[in-house]
Image (spheres, helix red, strand yellow):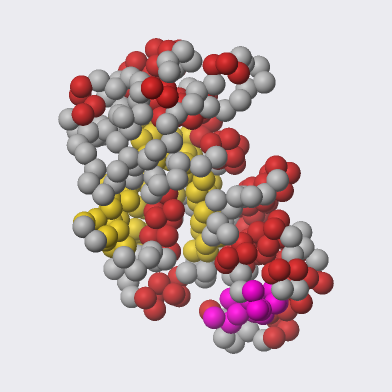
Amino acid sequence: MSLLSVRDLEVHYEVEDGYVHAVDDVSFDIERESLVGILGESGCGKSTLSKSIIGGLDDNAVIRSGEILFDGVDLTEISDEQMREIRWEKIAFIPQSAMGSLDPVSTIKEQLFETIRAHRSDVSKQECLERAKEVLDLVGISSGRLRSYPHQLSGGMRQRVLLALALILEPELIIADEPTTGLDVLLRDKILNDIETYRDEYGVSALFVSHDIADLVETTEYLIEMYGGKITERGPSKQLFDRPIHPYTIGLKGSLPDLHENTDEMIAMKMQPPNLKNPEEGCRFRNKCPFAVEECRTAHPELTEQRDGIETACYRASEAEMMREEAKTVDWSNV
C-alpha cells in the first residue's frame, strides 16, 4: 500500500460570485521512502494541493470530492483533533516563508520544545533539549543558536530551522512548499541534498512543491506537473525532463538556459494563468499552446501512458518529437 494516495481530488475556493476550481480531478501516489515533486507556475494549484493533505486550507476553501489516503486513512473524513495528531507527528510541512512561519517572539528552543510537547507531553525537559540539539546538528546549526530569535538568524538559517522543526518528530512524510525560495544556489543545493540524505538515513518520504523544474529534476525521482488545477504530465523525473511530451513541459525545458545550446532558441511563454473561476471546456493549456488544434477546445484530454512510465494529457502526444523540434522556432509569445 502506498504511503499517500490522492484520488480524484477537487478543491474549490468560494468567492462572491462562484467558485475557483483550484484543484480539479487530481490523482497520484507517493510510495514509502520516495522523493516526489509537484511542478507548476503560480496559480496552478500545487500549494492548494499540499495544504489539502495537511488540513491547512483557507477558510473559504472546500474539498468538493475525492480522497486523500494516508496509511489507508482518508484525511478528508477525520476530525480536526485526529488531523492534529497526524500533523507533524506523521506528516510535517515546510512552508514557503521562513520569517513569516516562525514565531518572532519565541526562541528557536521554545519553538522546538513546543512542537515536541504538543504531541509527546510525557517527554522531559532534558529529553527535549537533547532532541533539539540533535535535530539542529542534523541541519548544520550550532546548538548555541537555541537561544536565538528568528530575526537574529540569516534567511538560510531560518529555512534550516523550519527543516529542523519538520524533522524533530521523525515523520513519515515531509511536504516542502517552495523550500528554497529566496536562497542562494549553494544553500538551495544543501537543503535539497539534506532532505535526500534524511530519506536515505531515516526512511522519510518527501513531496517537493516548486516552480523550479531544474531543482525538482535534480532532487526527485518522480515528477507531477500541474497547470490550471489539472495534471498535465507525470512520470520519472529524468526521463520526463530529457524527452518531454506535453507542450507545457517542452516549453518549460526550453525556457532554461543551456551552456551547450544557442540561447536565441530559448522559449518565452505567456505567464498569465487561465481563469479558474469559470474554466472553459477543453485543455486548460490550449491558449498558451502553439500546437493546439480544434479538438483541444472540446474537452480536457485524459492522462494516457506514452513511454518510460510517463503519462501525458495531450491530444497530440504521439507527435511529441515534432513538437520538441518545432518548439525551438515557434513564437510562443504570440499564441
- In the image, 83 versus 260, the foreground residue is 260
Q: Provide the residue span drawn in magenta.
A: 104-118
Q: Position of residue 211 (x, y in %)?
A: 51, 42
Identity of the residue drawn at 70% across and 81% down: 127
The quarter of the picture where residue 114 lies is bottom right
Q: Residue at x 32, y 51 (%)?
A: 22
Q: Main secondary structure of the magenta part?
A: helix
Is residue 286 found left or right of 168 in the rendered image? left
Q: Is residue 9 above or below residue 299?
A: below
Q: Percent x, y for residue 64?
A: 24, 58
Please give the name of the residue rendered at 28% of the width and 56% of the height, measured from the top-left corner. 12
Dividing the picture into quadrants, the one containing residue 83 is bottom left
- Residue 291 falls in image quadrant: top left
Q: Is residue 160 visible?
A: no
Residue 203 percent location from the top left of the image: 58, 55
Q: What x and y, as percent, mark residue 307?
A: 39, 24
Q: Residue at x 58, y 35 (%)?
A: 214
Residue 184 is inside the magenta segment:
no
Residue furthest left as drawn? 298
Q: Quadrant of the C terminus?
A: top left
Question: 188 or 183, which is in the foreground?
Answer: 183
Q: Nearer the viewer, residue 155 or 175?
A: 155
User: Position of 191 compared to 33: left or right?
Assistant: right
Specify whether residue 109 is painted magenta. yes
Say if 220 sits above or below 239 in the image.
Answer: below
- Residue 216 visible in the picture: yes
